[in-house]
Amino acid sequence: MKENITDMKKYLSERVLKLEESPTFALEKKVDMLDGQLKAKGDYVVRFGIGQPDFNTPDNIKVAAKTAIDENKTKYTASTGIKELKQAIVDKLARDNNLDYGLENIFVGNGGKQVLDAIIRAFVNTRDAVLVPKPYWVSYTQQVVLSEGIPLEVDFNDFLKIDVEHLKSLIKQHGSRIKCLILNSPGNPTGAVYNLKELKEIASICVDNNIFIISDEVYEIFIFGNAAHISAASLGDEVKNITLTVNAVSKTYAMTGWRIGYIAAHKDIISQMTKIQDQSASNPCTPAQWAAVEALNGDQQSVELMRLEYEKRRDYIYKRLTSIDGIKCSLPEGAFYVFPDVSSFYKGDIKNSFDFSSQLLEKAYVAVVPGAAFGDDSFVRISYATAIDKIKEGMDRFEKFCRNLSG
């Protein structure tokens, strides 16, 4: 007689059991529950947690999707995307990033996250290493773990960018086991943007050590002040040969739920990733692909309006944060996040970023993500992808909370 299965975990893979729940999505579930309770009392949670644009998808993109459906463009496509979308991506990369690619160099997936996962699957064997600079987006390390690789966390400097000396020491220590370096500029959670000199130094190290660069550029359009976005692959043929440029329509066009991401890379890499897509997702959502064609080829005015609004919000939230005693904060040059150091408030019941974030939510009804989720416990991440009136209210609550802790 078969035994009753009571402990499901002993039947599951070690690989999946090692995986951590996404802290941003876990936070959203907790916030949804609290927000529902508060709204019944006429209050609400100010959400600075998940990185989701508060803008709606532009009308021209929505019309393109509706038209595709009306024209019955709803069936399977080539697994890595329709040729019209690949051509739009090729044109965009030439226009915006000074990159020359053909259709054979393009892979379209179900959002930037799935594209990144397919890259890691294509490169990483058991015990292979991937360099993940801190602070990092929460899924980078976990995707490496899911492929049974080892994420090597690279320390950061005073500008929240790669500490080059630590990078070199990790390469010296782990050598040929290192397959890739993940480079995110503009960065999540920091908003840091790498300049030309910094990119050249990092790229040179990778070229010399045969380390592939996974260049995550999903926030490229949201650049502020005197900063400029530079694609790593544009630094010359040697660098381009080892660089995988990742992007998506999610943030740029407020299309997070449409799930269209893409990569440009050497055709031999694309051909191997294609096999992964063939056996997993089949193809990206067909109407969403046609919407993405319009997003990339159509009027870009809405994108600039969003960028200008994010810059205003950044300026306001940075001014408010830096006026609070005990807060240290760098000015973000891109994306829509700010990453303040709140460690001066770690005393009594608050011992780390999880305690700080938890009490901020419970007492002030403000949701932020603990910095520990991004690899450093001294910080919290605040997303300013929300309306300015909500930001003002959230900063009022945040400042009062910090003042009470100091008092």
Image (tube, rainbow, N blue to C red):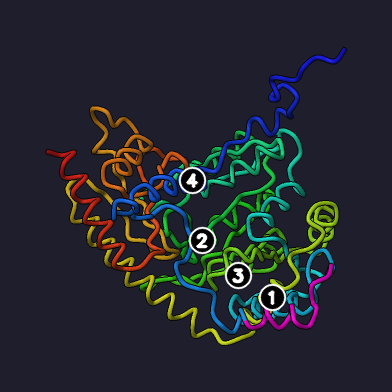
User: Dot 4: what SS?
Assistant: helix
Q: Which residue carries the number 1 mark?
A: 89
* Residue 163 seen in this snapshot: no
Mark 3 residue crowding within 10 angstroms, few (<14) / some (14–19) / many (20+): many
Residue placed furthest toward the front: 40
Label 3, on which residue? 249
Identify the mark nearer the N-term, 2 or 3.
2
Residue range (magenta)? 63-77
Depth order, front residue of 5/401: 5
Horizontal side of residue 284 vs 192, given as left or right: right
Q: CA distance from mark 2 to mark 1?
A: 19 Å
In this rendered view, identify the residue nearer to me: 49 or 205: 49
Q: Which numbered disc covers residue 185?
A: 2
Of the image marks 3 and 4, the number of the one nearer the N terminus = 4
The answer to whether 120 is drawn above or below residue 318 in the figure is above
Q: Earlier in the sequence, mark 2 or mark 1?
A: 1
Numbered label attached to residue 29 = 4
Foreground: disc 1 or disc 4: 4
Instruction: Farthest residue to the top: give it.
Output: 1
Query: SS of the residue at dot 2?
Result: loop
Q: How far apart, in angstroms, are the residues tagged by discs 4 and 2?
A: 28 Å
C-alpha gap between disc 3 and disc 4? 25 Å
| Whole-percent x, y for residue 298 in the image | 61, 86
